Amino acid sequence: MFAPNFRLFSDIHLGIKNLLLHKLRSLLTMLGLVFGVGSVIAMLAVGEGASAEALEQIRRLGSKNIIITAQKAADEQAQANARSRISIYGLLYEDEERLAQTIPTVSSIVPVKVAQKSARMENRTMELRIVGTNQDWFELVMRPVVAGRVLEYRDVQERSNVVVLTEHGVRKLMATEAILGEVVHIGSNYYEVIGVVLSEGASEGSMQTPDQQTDAYIPITTARDHFGDYFSQNKSGANIRELVELNQLIVEVDKEEHVEATAEAIERMLAIFHKKKDYSISVPLALLHQAEATKRTFNIVLGAIAGISLLVGGIGIMNIMLASVTERTREIGIRRAIGAKQRQIVFQFLIETVVLSMTGGMVGIAVGVLIPKIIHMITAMPTIVSVTSLVLSLGISVSVGVIFGIYPAFRAARLDPIVALRHE
């Protein structure tokens, strides 16, 4: 009952002993698999980390959200270069009403009005992007609240002079001051700071996130009263004049499966009332699907590149085992002469290749886990080492050992015992 197991352990011990007779050669052979397995794990960890970060940014925009952003049409951009022309473009207050009333899958709509203004507190000043919106913005675009509160329904109804700053803005304006309850001079008006939030402040793919690090959120009713829809600025000797009612609409759809159809309905409806195509539509869910597909392709490419290293390692194993067959020809002849069968010779050589590949694979796993940690420490780039990549890499390394060890093993087993005994 225990004989097969005893023979297996004996064969493994013999295989390790044979490999240790040529330590340097065995070590150099394993290096191909070590680097191959290590590169597979490290490359997949870097790719997985980058993809996970990108996907998380998109998810934070809301998988049920559709972001409509005002933009100048091509002909409007050309007209803006003329000093006497006023650029009229962007979303309308009526668009918000039309979307809410005509598309049944729309559950809520958040209007956004943007203005660039200088903010001042005592002797500190900075340029802020003033975002006029309502309380629902903070439900659709979820950002952590650092202190205080966000806008509420009563702030919009009462047209309150209150502002929610980002942590970046707070550090610039209030480096040594208390935050909540302080008054900030924005434009020609004063606003009480009621809260602080973190901002994303980044782009993902072709879609700009709804917030930036220099944002300051005020009620949209207050923004309309204080800033209006008309904007005028002298820049590079030209007088830029624009009339924009809304800069952005964030639409929440009732169900995730309705998002793409709703985006198409919104596109058709806006095309009727905006002949100049002065808007763009971003769908985080569609971008999420695209990013996931890109991630799969990226992982396949990385795996294929790293697999070349494993192939080279496999060739190295085949090379050393063929050399071993030549060196041990007389030994093989003796074993065959005293009754060893061909399958036992094959098994013995396969054990040696598996020991080589498994040892190289395990060392490669250690290297593959260590490299992403070093990359993260040096570059702060996110890396994720998955258990799947570890198991897959070890399995591939063992398979490489078996596949590339089969030919040398069968070549050894097929040696003629008489010829092998005469070999010097």
Image: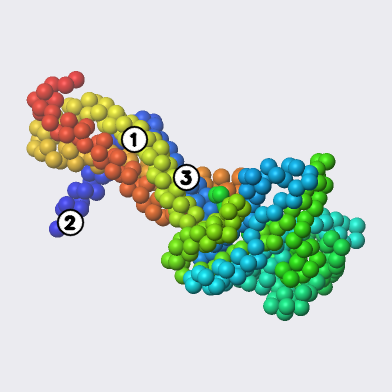
The label number, if any, that marks residue 311 in the structure image: 1
Instruction: Say which residue label 2 marks.
Output: 2
Left or right of 324? Residue 274 is: right
Of residues 281 and 150, the one drawn nearer to the viewer in this rendering? 281
Label 2: how many residues lie within 10 Å, few (<14), some (14-19) or many (20+)? Answer: few
Left or right of 37? Residue 326 is: left
Q: How many marks?
A: 3
Q: Amino acid at mark 2?
A: Phe
Q: Give the mark nearest the N terminus, 2 or 1.
A: 2
What is the spatial separation of the Cα atoms under label 1 and label 3, in whole angstroms? 17 Å
Eye-nearest disc, 2 or 3: 3
Label 3: how many residues lie within 10 Å, few (<14), some (14-19) or many (20+)? Answer: many
Instruction: Say which residue label 3 marks.
Output: 42
The picture places residue 313, in percent across and down from the top left corner, at 35, 34
Q: Amino acid at mark 1?
A: Leu
Left or right of 5? Residue 117 is: right
Residue contact between numbered discs 2 and 1, judged by CB atoms under 8 Å: no
The picture places residue 401, in percent across and down from the top left corner, at 29, 39
Disc 2 is placed on an element classified as loop
The image quadrant of residue 408 is top left
Observer able to see residue 141: no
Disc 3 is placed on an element classified as helix
What is the spatial separation of the Cα atoms under label 2 and label 3, in whole angstroms? 41 Å
Residue shown at 45%/63% (left/top)?
261
- Tell me the quarter of the image containing the C terminus: top left
Q: Give the mark nearest the N terminus, 1 or 3.
A: 3
Label 1: how many residues lie within 10 Å, few (<14), some (14-19) or many (20+)? Answer: some
The picture places residue 321, in percent across and down from the top left corner, at 26, 31
Q: Amino acid at mark 3?
A: Ala
